[in-house]
Image: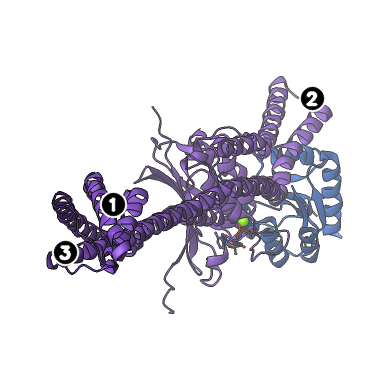
Amino acid sequence: MKPADPPATVRAPGAGSAGPEGRRDRKDPNLAERLREAEAALVRRPRLSIRLRMVASLVLCFLASGAFSLGAFILLRKAEVKLHLLQTLERLDDRLLRVRALEDEKILSRADVDRALDGVRQADALLRSGSHALQEADRAIVPALLLQLGTCDRLLSVVRGAAEVGGRPGALSARDGAELRRAEAEGNRLLEVIIRRERSSLDGILRFAETGPLVLLGLQLVLFVGIILAFAKALVNPIRRFEGYTARIAAGDFSFITPTRRYRDEFSDLAVGVNQMLGELQAQQHRLVKGAKLAVVGTLTSGIAHELNNPLNNVAITTEALMEDLPTLSDKEKWRLLQDIYFETERASEIVKSLLDFTRQEKGEMVAVDLADVLGSTLRLAQNEMNLNNVSFTCQMPPDLPRVRGAANQLRQVFLNLLLNAIQAMPGGGRVWVSAGPQDEGKVCVEIRDEGTGIPAEVLPRIFDPFFTTKEPGQGTGLGLSVSLSIIRTFGGDMQVVSSLGRGTTVHTCLPRADEG
Amino acid sequence: MSEDRDVMVLDDEPIVGDRLRPALEKEGFTVEVFTDSAMAISRLKEKSFGVLVTDMKMRGPSGMDVLRFVREKAPKTQVIVITGYATIETSHEASAWGAYQFVAKPFKLKELVKLVDKAAKAATA
Ligand SMILES: Nc1ncnc2c1ncn2[C@@H]1O[C@H](COP(=O)(O)OP(=O)(O)O)[C@@H](O)[C@H]1O
Ligand SMILES: [Mg+2]
């Protein structure tokens, strides 16, 4: 004997991506209304477009580097003025020292006096116009220096005036000579103070100019990292989110996108577009489910006709018998015939009612559904199809089966599909086992098992595909499982098929429990 | 000549047998009614009937199975097949297996009795 193939299993495609809560909580069946609501929610937020943010960041960068350039320019300007001033002051310092030394030796030449006078005037002019470039402390001593320089100027001019006539600089009176010396000495002292301080200040500026670019580099790095992070947030996060959306849409969850951020941007426009697409998909899905339902009714036609013809025939022949034999029948017999007619009429109308119940459009509202009820009425609907095909069933359910979230009629459609598949898998007749029970994670699972042909492993992965069928046209549309899965997914559940070739197939359908009370 | 007035009615709807029995008996037939095809087959093994009226779709052996059985065991028995839902295939299959007549539900009692009468005559002929 050939060892049995191990049973193969297929989980419904895209399993694990259950629809978001939003969909399940929504009760409004009106698609257009929901679409409008979703769009309004997306558009209601204040707009902060990515383009605006991009422009703002660039402007910020431009302003930051502009400010730095301006600062550098001002600093360099200051250094330049300072340098010029420093040179002038140093030159004057030199010349004054020289005048003082030569005065002592009494060999002061006219040129020396000229140069000193020149230096004094230049420094005077510069200090009057450019003292702003000096340090605060230096500016405080500038008036004192100017006073000394004024004295030097006046007295040196006298010295030089004498030289104009005689060729050699003349001597001053003793009092003026002493004053000049004092002024020169004081000038030298003040100049040196200023020179020393300004030099170190210039050194400071130069050091700053050296380290400045490094600081700028650091600042720019921080700025860029900030901007990049902000844009990553603005661009990559929504793209990730949309990846998630496409994954769940591919898995058959067509619920609308809802706002996740406080602002809206270009991605929100995209979301509005995607929602329109989703609305269209939902409508399409609706039509598909409806079409598949009618197709199932089509499959049931022969069973239904048979089922209806039996009571009709019973009514017809009983009426005929009654009319024929009315005079000869006893009252008791008449009563029995009338009773037959009554109950057979009842039976016929039950059949019509169950069929109408099934095809009736119900609002897709989700309520707490009693699975025992749903399975019972579905089994009644399929009963004749089973009779016709010599299929019997066993139904096993705990009496306290928890209710599930869903819509009774759509669940009936699912279980009818599964029962018909099971019946069709057993052309020579057989048995179907139907059982239901609570499972962990707040789920209730229904198991429908047949002992039919089973599903070949290479076919198994495709059975949930829309329009995939191995049956003759007229027997199967290939919509049964795909539509069933989409219905079950809408209710937040999932399906799984286990099959072993030649031995049978088991379909597990799990639904979330309705949380009551 | 008495044998061909024996009729078996087989239908899992009890009312069919209940109504056919008096109607046929009025015409002088001896009628045996069955609602279970397996039991009917075992009865057919013991006794041959002039006419067999059988439903097509039933639990257990179908009308077609019964027809095939009768064709082998009692070729003289005429078989009238009634069905709730007639398809071209089933009617073809029934005539291929030599059914006397194929009748769709709902039928008229009178017509079926007339048909049984004709079939009984054909069985004797
Ligand atoms: N219980 C089952 N036993 C064997 N094969 C099955 C069963 N259920 C589904 N299948 C396979 O999966 C295919 C797709 O099923 P379905 O979507 O219901 O479409 P259809 O029944 O119209 O063909 C079937 O054609 C059949 O090959
Ligand atoms: Mg199917």
A379 relative position to A16: left or right: right
Q: Nearer the viewer, mark 1 or mark 3?
A: 3
Name the spot of residue A394 as percent of width and height, x first.
48, 48
Residue at image coords 85%, 49%: B115
Secondary element at image label 1: loop
- Chain in blue, by letter, is B
- Residue topped by disc 2: A328
Question: Which badge, 2 or 3, is on the more N-terminal residue?
Answer: 3
Q: Nearer the viewer, mark 1 or mark 2?
A: 1
Tell whether label 2 touches label 1 (CB within 8 Å). Answer: no
The residue type indicated by label 3 comes to: Glu
Question: Which badge, 1 or 2, is on the more N-terminal residue?
Answer: 1
Name the spot of residue A372 as percent of width and height, x first.
48, 38
Question: From where the camera sits, is residue A508 visible?
Answer: no
Q: How would you rate the neighbour count of disc 1 (Cα within 10 Å): few for under 14, some for 14-19, many for 20 or more?
A: many
Residue B75 in which image quadrant? bottom right
Q: Nearer the viewer, mark 2 or mark 3?
A: 3
The residue type indicated by label 1 comes to: Leu
Q: Residue placed farthest to the top in the image?
A: A331
* Vertical arrangement, residue A180 with respect to residue A321, above or below: below
Secondary element at image label 2: loop
Residue at image coords 70%, 50%: A295
The label shown at residue A134 is 1
- Chain in purple, by letter, is A
- Residue topped by disc 3: A103
Question: Which badge, 1 or 3, is on the more N-terminal residue?
Answer: 3
Q: CA distance from mark 1 to mark 2?
A: 142 Å
Which quadrant does the C terminus of chain A fall into?
top left
User: Are discs 1 and 3 both within one chain?
Assistant: yes
Image mark 1: chain:
A
Name the spot of residue A437 as percent of width and height, x first.
39, 44
